[in-house]
Image: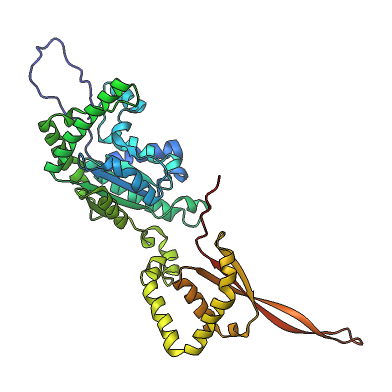
Amino acid sequence: MYEERIAMNTSQPIKKSAPPIDLEVKDAQLIFNSVWKELEAVHGRVNLRFPKELILLGGAPGAGKGTNTDFIRKVRDIPEDPIVVSELLNSPEAKSIKAQGGMVGDREVVGLVFRKLLDSQYQGGAILDGFPRTNVQVECLKMLFDRMISLRREFADQPEAVHFKQPVFHIMVLFVDEAESVARQLKRGRQTIAHNEEVERSGVGQVWEERPTDFNEDLAKNRYRVFKEQTYNALVSLKQFFHYHFINAQASLEIVQDNILHELEYQSSLELDPRTFHSLQAIPLASEIVSHARRDLVTRLDRYEIEQSELFHRVVDYIEDRMMPIVMRHAISGHANINSEDLIWEDNDALAMLIDVFSERGYHATVDVRRHDVPVRFDLQTGDIEYNQKKVYRFIIRFAGSEIRRG
């Protein structure tokens, strides 16, 4: 909160025990407008380019937030380390505020966070750890989202539009109950002591930070209560506004990361411009196609055998007798090119059968048709040349090649 010095008449006796007056501004709209005005003055409106994707990460003590952050970054292709608000509060800017007698309240926190989000490396996406934690910060975050939408509309028909993407905010909470949280904190304390003793004995490695809450059950419980009352409640309050992901982190790491992956699956409807999404929605996602691919392949092969047996067996025989010897000679590279002029391939069903047969056996087969004009008659008087067209079917067969031990 702000600290304000109040002039006093020294001729009057000083009254004791008067509680300090809290003069911090609590109006979220005033705070947001003040911060936004500063940002415009420093950067210019056209340069207020915030991350297109923002993941607000909160986790109970011991929930594995640090363990899973890199996994979350990988899933969402976010290259930069998280923005940790507690580290911002130890920044030179925050220390300067405190050195001048001030305290870092909502106004200062919002300003620090928003300025950090404008760094160019975060435009593709950012993870924000430790924000929001108060009702004022919650409201400022919602105003930021609204202002980003307004900027997107403002620059929609200008060259700068590429820098104002459809914003996507995720709320992610890694949760464990109090008993599990306390147990994990104390376990981490025991592991820290053992690790630091080994570092001191061997002189190898880095000393881990020893947190007081990792060695005292009452402190560990209090840290959990602070999480529930501040971070957790603040993030849950945004559930109705942004995409909310509640991750049960009491399971094994593998299961937790599977849950994270499921929660953060690609959702084009959230990321694309609505007009773009509308244009593409008739094309199915790859995940939708492959989910039943094996079942559909088996159905097609059985249908070939029952309904087009003669053609199917000709295709199988051709593959076995004339193509597999060539494929086997390329077993090391895993890549074979085969040309054919056989008339069997004039039938499109035969080509479909070939691709399906190779797919069922674990190969990847593609085919294209090359057409060549072959001269068959030349008119000496007119100089005209008559051509016949020849089709050459080029098959490309790929598979996992041999791994040869070298050296």
Q: Position of residue 161 (x, y in %)?
A: 48, 53
The quadrant of the rendering that contains the N terminus is top left
The quadrant in which residue 345 appears is bottom right
Looking at the image, which is closer to me, 161 or 113?
Answer: 113
Identify the residue at image location x=41%, y=51%.
151
How far across and how far down the image is residue 179, in percent?
A: 11, 42
Pick whichever, 48 or 132, lies toward us. 132
Q: Dividing the picture into quarters, in which one does residue 132 lie?
A: top left
Please report the residue visible at 18 percent of the width from the left and 35 percent of the height from the top. 187
Question: In percent of the image, x 36 and y 25: which residue is there?
Answer: 92
User: Compared with residue 406, is residue 281 higher up or lower down, i.e. above or below?
Assistant: below
Judge left or right: residue 317 versus residue 213.
Answer: right
Instruction: Judge whether 363 appears above or below 191 on screen.
Output: below
Report the side of 284 relative to 397 (left or right): left
Rendered location of residue 281, percent (x, y): 41, 69
Q: Quadrant of the C terminus?
A: top right
